[in-house]
Amino acid sequence: PLIYGVTLPMGKPFLTAGLGAGFGGAFCMAMMVAATTWGPSGILALPIMTAGGSNPAMQVAYYGIGLVISYIMGFFFTYISLKDRDVAHA
């Protein structure tokens, strides 16, 4: 609901969240994080990120770090790109 009800109609937040996710995804790819199965994303995916290059505990940690990078960078890009006029005030 957040994607389709808020970010996609506004445009900029959708793009900036995707840009932020790219940074976290690049970190995860560099650390060779891989999932053992199809499943959820975000925090709920932590337990299934155990099939990568190093030991499973490190893969879970790397995924968590990548997730935090995605959140921080998404916030940063959204914060610098949105202006007060872009947000409707109730």
Image (cartoon, grey):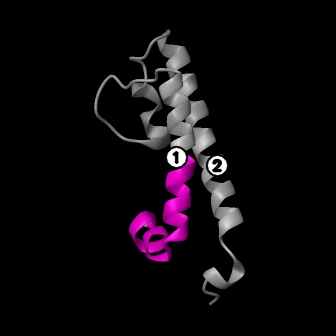
For label 2, the SS is helix
Image coords of residue 11 (percent x, y)? 49, 72
- Which residue is labeled 2 in the image? 73
Q: Residue 57, relative to residue 20: is it above or below? A: above
Residue 18 in magenta? yes
- Which residue is labeled 1 in the image? 21
Q: Which mark is residue 6?
A: none
First reached walking from the N terminus: tag 1 or tag 2: 1
Image coords of residue 15 (percent x, y)? 50, 61
- Magenta part of the chain: 2-20
Do labels 1 and 2 touch, CB within 8 Å? yes
Q: Quadrant of residue 51?
A: top left
Q: Quadrant of residue 3?
A: bottom left
In the rendered structure, the answer to whether residue 73 lies left or right of residue 14 reads: right
Q: Residue at x 67, y 85 (%)?
A: 85
Image coords of residue 48 (percent x, y)? 39, 26
Q: Amino acid at mark 2?
A: Met
Residue 15 in magenta? yes
Question: Distance between the Cα atoms at labels 1 and 2?
Answer: 7 Å
Q: Residue 36, relative to residue 5: is it above or below? A: above
Q: Quadrant of residue 27?
A: top right
